[in-house]
Image: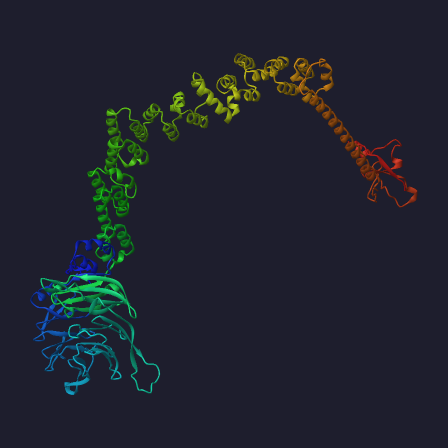
């Protein structure tokens, strides 16, 4: 049901929380209750207008019946108006049913017939679509209530119930006569009747009764347990379903459940009874109407507290509350104060609550009509549109967008994009441009037109810097003008970001020539701007004008030049610019050169760097680490470079290479007085005595001298070292400690001058003796091992030779090739079997033969023979 098209959305004056109502008294109270605005109400309110407004301008509403098809409004002038949910008169249906106030209206379940009663004593029943069963019954006394049989439209008896001081069941008799039956009397006026199925509930001055039509018995009497006047505070009845009855009377609420009695009872009690399952009092307000919403109660309430203005009593706003009912207490879930027109002058009985449910499976289709003499307001559970509207009003746009995403199929008034638009405008109004730019990604998605429109909007506000990171680059791809506009903006406001975008964006997004032109114009005013020069180099690279790009990168000494070279294979272009590359990043330059030796030959690099020896050293040193063979022809240069820039690497290089010129190397180390290197080179040239003399006389390093002699293992060199050391006590100590395994220490000891003081001599002699004892011990141990091994091997040999050798009939003589073993004794002969398993007749061998003829011929080595005679 669409209600928003023609009904007025309730403004703030219609729906307010009860705290806001109190807050109108003083400004401080209003301020203190601002937090209540953060709680979303459960119901949405609309004022029913259109034709209804014109009716209430002339007349006053006295009651209303709410059906799923229409509204039936009764007035104080006795007229009944048939309206739709929006307050429009349905096909001019208007019935002047009574001459005075309409007290109650009842509609059958199908919405075909309407019954009304009035103080004029008449009960008027008429059909909306047929007049066949129309009737007017005159009781000659005021009738306060009436209820149609819910199945009146198809019942043949056409029953209805009226109430004055009696409860009368009316039905059609024989030949369409009118029959009546009194169901109850004697307890005062009957002001409210509700009929559901086979159960009729009514209220009088003493309480509420329920009548069962099946058993034709009154099944309960619920006593009125408060002292309020029933004519001022009427009883409100509502059947929640076929078994559950809700009662709201003055300041008492009861929930009753009709149950079937189990088993037989000797007291002949009715088959059904009523149990009160929830009951509570409302000390602060009176009940004007009662209904249900799912498992909750909906109460229309009237505040007990009144105010006085100018000596006149003023009523407070009525409230619509949603509560959970319990025994002796209730839980309030929602409380909305309603600014009904003229509420200040109304009393409790001036309000009525009508309820209907269009679709029982949809909670939003529950409608609650609040009726007052001059105003009708409809309340309904808030749907997702209402929820989103409330979120937007409270500026919770993100939650509203999430709700729109989850419930997109349920929305009628809102869309995700509309909400996003409102959020975007809100952020822009708040000057939160970065958040607004991020939001564009969500709400525009792949819509090119929306993106471009928003880009121009940001441009007009000079805030493109916030939008640029979120502009789509592909799917959708915007017009080149958009990207050029962004680049131009950063060109004049932030050159660093301009450079970043030139690097990150694909060059196909914009016109490169146009951007180059504006960059050059900008450089005319700021020639040394590195960011702009860098960007210009990038742009030239995109245009494949690599010579221009290289020139700019080299001018800037920018590392990106190496990226450009690798990316576009520009090694030939930079082969004559090696020095320039080395000047601003020698590590990157050397790495590039070493990784592309096939494109930039070593000879070409060396020729360019010869005048810059430092760079040449760096290059050749890294080249040596990668490939020693590549520097063979530059070994002599490497000696000079290591001597100049990295002496610790010189000696290892001299030891590991043989390609350098020895004379040049000797001259270089002599000039620089590099003694360890000179010693090594003299040793390599064969001038070991000079080398040893330098170690002894200039380096004074006995350990190095000893190592030098050990390395060359020359007896004359040892003699020279001993000779050079005789006048050097420290050297003698070193020799005594180290030469024991190479030279007999006695030779040195004998040549020591008598009386010379030698440091740690005793320890040195002790060490010599210990070394000697160790040598003797080692020799004895080795001797024992050799002897033991010899005995062991001999025993194995003897055991092996003692083993028998098998000879069978298959063996033949190695000389005569006859069988070794014969059966006739006259042909028998002694047999000689060799360890190689070959055998021969003794007569066939020479007396001097000791080795196997076959194995000797094949050079397998001689084997001793064992002779076995048979």
Query: In the drawing, does residue 623 fall left or right of residue 500?
Result: right
464 or 503: nearer the eye? Answer: 464
Q: Quadrant of residue 551?
A: top left
Report whether 718 appears left or right of 300: right
Residue drawn at (78%, 34%) of the image: 789
Q: In which quarter of the image is residue 289?
A: bottom left
Residue 49 in sight:
no
Q: Position of residue 350 (x, y in %)?
A: 14, 69
Where residue 616 appears, as percent x and y from the top left, is 45, 20
Q: In the displayed structure, would residue 285 be above or below residue 739?
A: below
Visible residue check, residue 774? yes
Q: Which quarter of the figure is the N terminus placed in?
A: bottom left
Q: Quadrant of residue 775?
A: top right
Viewer-proximal residue, 677 or 13?
Answer: 13
- Which residue lies most toward the front here? 311
- Horizontal and vertical percent for residue 504? 32, 36
> Is residue 80 toward the left or the right of residue 294 in the image?
left
- The total of numbered circles placed on residues is 0
| Residue 318 vertical placement versus 190 (above, below) | above
753 lies above or below 491:
above
Q: Nearer the viewer, residue 229 or 495?
A: 229
Tell me the residue at 29%/39% (across/down).
Answer: 469
Q: Which quarter of the image is occupied by the C terminus?
A: top right
Give the color scheme: rainbow, by chain, secondary structure or one colour. rainbow
- Residue 516: image location, x then y, percent: 26, 29
Asked if residue 185 is positioned above or below residue 536 in the image, the reply reads below
């Amino acid at each position: 049901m669409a209600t928003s098209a023609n009904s007025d959305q309730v403004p703030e004056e219609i729906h307010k929380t009860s705290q806001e109502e109190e807050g109108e008294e003083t400004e401080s109270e209003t301020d203190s209750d601002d937090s209540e605005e953060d709680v979303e109400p459960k119901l949405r309110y609309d004022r029913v207008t259109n034709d209804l407004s014109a009716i209430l301008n002339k007349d006053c509403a006295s009651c209303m019946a709410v059906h799923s098809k229409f509204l039936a409004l009764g007035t104080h002038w006795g007229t009944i108006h048939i309206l739709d949910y929006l307050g429009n008169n349905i096909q001019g249906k208007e019935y002047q049913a009574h001459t005075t106030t309409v007290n109650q209206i009842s509609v059958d379940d199908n919405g075909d017939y309407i019954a009304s009663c009035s103080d004029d004593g008449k009960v008027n029943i008429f059909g909306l679509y047929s007049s066949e069963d129309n009737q007017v019954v005159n009781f000659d006394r005021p009738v306060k209530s009436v209820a149609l049989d819910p199945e009146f439209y198809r019942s043949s008896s056409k029953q209805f119930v009226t109430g004055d001081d009696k409860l009368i069941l009316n039905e059609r008799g024989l030949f369409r006569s009118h029959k009546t039956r009194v169901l109850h009397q004697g307890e005062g006026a009957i002001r409210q009747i509700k009929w559901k199925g086979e159960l009729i509930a009514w209220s009088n001055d003493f309480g509420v009764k329920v009548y069962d039509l099946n058993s034709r018995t009154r099944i309960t009497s619920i006593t009125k347990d408060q002292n309020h006047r029933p004519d001022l505070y009427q009883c409100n009845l509502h059947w929640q379903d076929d078994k559950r009855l809700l009662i709201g009377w003055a300041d008492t609420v009861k929930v009753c459940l009709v149950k079937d009695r189990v088993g037989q009872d000797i007291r002949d009690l009715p088959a059904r009874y009523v149990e009160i399952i929830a009951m509570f009092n409302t000390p602060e307000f009176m009940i004007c109407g009662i209904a249900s919403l799912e498992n909750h109660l909906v109460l229309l309430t009237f505040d007990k507290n009144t105010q006085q203005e100018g000596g006149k009593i003023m009523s407070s706003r009525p409230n619509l509350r949603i509560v959970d009912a319990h025994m002796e207490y209730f839980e309030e879930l929602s409380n909305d104060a309603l600014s009904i027109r003229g509420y200040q002058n109304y009393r409790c009985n001036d309000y009525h609550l009508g309820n209907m449910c269009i679709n029982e499976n949809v909670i939003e289709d529950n409608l609650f009509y609040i009726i007052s003499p001059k105003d009708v307001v409809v309340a309904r559970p808030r749907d997702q549109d209402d929820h989103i509207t409330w979120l937007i009003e409270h500026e919770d746009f993100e939650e509203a967008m999430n709700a729109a995403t989850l419930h997109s199929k349920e929305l009628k008034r809102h869309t995700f994009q509309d909400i996003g638009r409102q959020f975007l405008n809100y952020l822009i109004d708040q000057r939160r441009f970065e958040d607004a730019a991020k939001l564009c990604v969500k709400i525009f998605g792949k819509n090119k037109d929306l993106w471009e429109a928003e880009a121009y909007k940001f441009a007009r506000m000079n805030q493109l810097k916030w939008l640029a990171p979120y502009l789509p680059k592909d799917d959708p791809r915007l017009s080149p003008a958009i990207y050029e506009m962004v680049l131009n903006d950063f060109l004049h406001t932030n050159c660093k970001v301009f450079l970043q975008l030139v690097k990150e964006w694909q060059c196909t997004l914009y016109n490169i020539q146009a951007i180059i032109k504006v960059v050059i114009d900008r450089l005319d005013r700021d020639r040394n701007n590195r960011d702009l020069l860098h960007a210009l180099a990038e742009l030239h690279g995109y245009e494949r004008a690599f010579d221009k790009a290289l020139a700019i990168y080299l001018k800037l000494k920018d590392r990106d030049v190496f990226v450009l070279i690798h990316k576009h294979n520009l090694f030939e272009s930079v082969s004559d610019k090696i020095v320039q590359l080395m000047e601003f990043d020698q590590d990157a330059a050397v790495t590039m050169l070493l990784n592309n030796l096939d494109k930039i030959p070593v000879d070409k690099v060396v020729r360019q760097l010869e005048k810059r020896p430092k760079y040449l050293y760096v290059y050749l040193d890294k080249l040596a680490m990668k490939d020693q063979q590549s520097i063979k022809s530059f070994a002599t240069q490497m000696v000079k470079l290591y001597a100049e820039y990295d002496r610790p690497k010189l000696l290892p290089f001299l030891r590991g290479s043989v390609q350098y010129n020895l004379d040049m190397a000797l001259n270089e180390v002599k000039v620089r007085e590099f003694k360890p290197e000179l010693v090594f080179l003299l040793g390599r040239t064969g001038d070991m005595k000079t080398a040893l003399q330098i170690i002894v006389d200039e380096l004074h390093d006995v350990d190095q001298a000893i190592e030098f002699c050990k390395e060359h293992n020359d007896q004359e060199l040892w003699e020279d070292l001993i000779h050079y050391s005789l006048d050097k006590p420290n050297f003698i100590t070193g020799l005594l400690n180290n030469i024991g395994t190479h030279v007999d220490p006695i030779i040195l000891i004998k040549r020591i001058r008598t009386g010379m003081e030698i440091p740690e001599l005793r320890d040195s002699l002790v060490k010599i003796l210990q070394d000697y004892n160790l040598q003797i011990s080692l020799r004895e141990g080795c001797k024992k091992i050799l002897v033991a091994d010899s005995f062991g091997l001999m025993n194995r040999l003897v055991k092996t030779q003692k083993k028998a050798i098998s000879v069978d009939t298959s063996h033949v003589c190695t000389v005569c090739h006859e069988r070794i073993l014969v059966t006739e004794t006259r042909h028998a002969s002694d047999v000689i079997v060799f360890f190689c398993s070959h055998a021969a007749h003794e007569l066939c061998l020479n007396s001097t033969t000791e080795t196997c003829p076959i194995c000797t011929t094949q050079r397998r080595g001689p084997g001793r023979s064992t002779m076995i005679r048979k």
